[in-house]
Image (tube, rainbow, N blue to C red):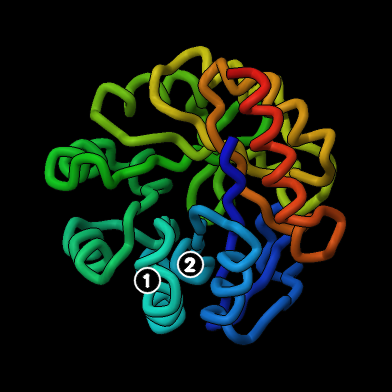
Amino acid sequence: MLLIPAIDLKDGQCVRLKQGDMDQATVFSEDPAAMARHWVEQGARRLHLVDLNGAFAGKPRNEAAIRSIIAEVGEEVPVQLGGGIRDLNTIERYLDGGLSYVIIGTAAVKNPGFLKDACAAFGGHIIVGLDAKDGKVATDGWSKLTGHEVVDLARKFEDYGVEAIVYTDIGRDGMLQGINIDATVRLAQAVTVSVIASGGLSKLDDINALCAVEREGVDGVICGRAIYSGELNFASAQDRADQLSEGAA
C-alpha cells in the first residue's frame, strides 16, 4: 500500500481545503519545493499535486510552483498532477517538463473523447480522477454535481487505457472522518486498473482498513490534512502500511 502525500497549490502556496471549498483554505507552506523535499525525506515514494486554481479556471495556474517541485524531487520520485488539464498540448508540456503522470478529471467527464485521445497519445501516463458525492461524479473543482455514477464512468475509462483511477469522496475530503472504504472497494472490484483512495484519511485505523482490502485493487491512498496537521505521522504510517502489505503477501 503506497501512501502519497498531496501538495495542493493555491496562489503558489501549499494549502488544504475542506470539502473542496476554496474559501476554507489553510496555508501550510509558502514554499512548495521545500514541502516536496520534506515529504521525500520522510519516505514518500510518489507525490500528488493539485493545481486548485487551475481546476476552477480550466487551465494551468500554478505552473511556476509545479516546476519548482519537479526540479527539486522529480528525478527521485514520480510526481502526478491534476487540475486544469484540458488539452493535449498541456499534457505534453507537463510530461516533457518531468511529470510522471497527468490526472484528468473534469475534462474526462465532459469530453470523454479527449481522455481517449490522451490515453492513445501518452499511454502509461494518464490517470483519471473521479470525485464523487453519494456515488455521483462532480466536476469543475467539485462545484458541479453530475448524474454520472462513479462505477459506470470508471468502467468506460478503463476501456480507454487509463493507468489508474484516483477516487475521492468529496464529503470526507479535508474532514478527517476516515476513508470511504466501502465505496472505494466497490469501485476497485468493478475495474481491473489500480485504484488510489483519497479523501478523509485521518488515523492508522484507516491504513489498517485499506491494507485489508489491498487485494481488491486498492493500491494507494492520498494523504492530506492528517499529515499536515500532525494527526498522522507520514513515515510511521508508511512503515505500518509496508508491514501490513508484507504480511498479506
Query: Residue 180 location, x and y as percent?
Result: 72, 30
Is 149 situated left or right of 163 in this image?
right
Residue tagged by mark 2? 51
Q: Quadrant of residue 235?
A: bottom right
Say the numbered circle drawn on residue 9.
none
Residue at 76% x, 50% y: name it.
236
**Above or below for 216 versus 90:** above
Is 171 situated left or right of 108 in this image?
right
Query: Residue 62 location, x and y as percent?
Result: 44, 77
User: Mark 2 falls on what kind of element?
Assistant: strand
User: Can you say which quadrant of the picture contains the C terminus?
Assistant: top right
Instruction: Give the spatial CA distance, label 2 vs label 1.
Output: 7 Å
Residue at 84% x, 62% y: name it.
230
Query: Residue 63 location, x and y as percent?
Result: 38, 78
Residue at 33% x, 22% y: name it.
156
Badge 1 density bin: few <14, some 14–19, many ≥20, Cα 10 Å: many
Q: Which amino acid does label 2 sit on?
A: Asp
Q: Which of 22 and 3 is in front in this view?
A: 3
Badge 2 density bin: few <14, some 14–19, many ≥20, Cα 10 Å: many
Residue at 39% x, 73% y: name it.
70
Is 73 situated left or right of 98 in this image?
right
Residue contact between numbered discs 2 and 1, judged by CB atoms under 8 Å: yes
**Above or below for 2 versus 183:** below
Residue tagged by mark 1? 60
* Residue 167 in sight: no
Q: Which amino acid does label 1 sit on?
A: Pro
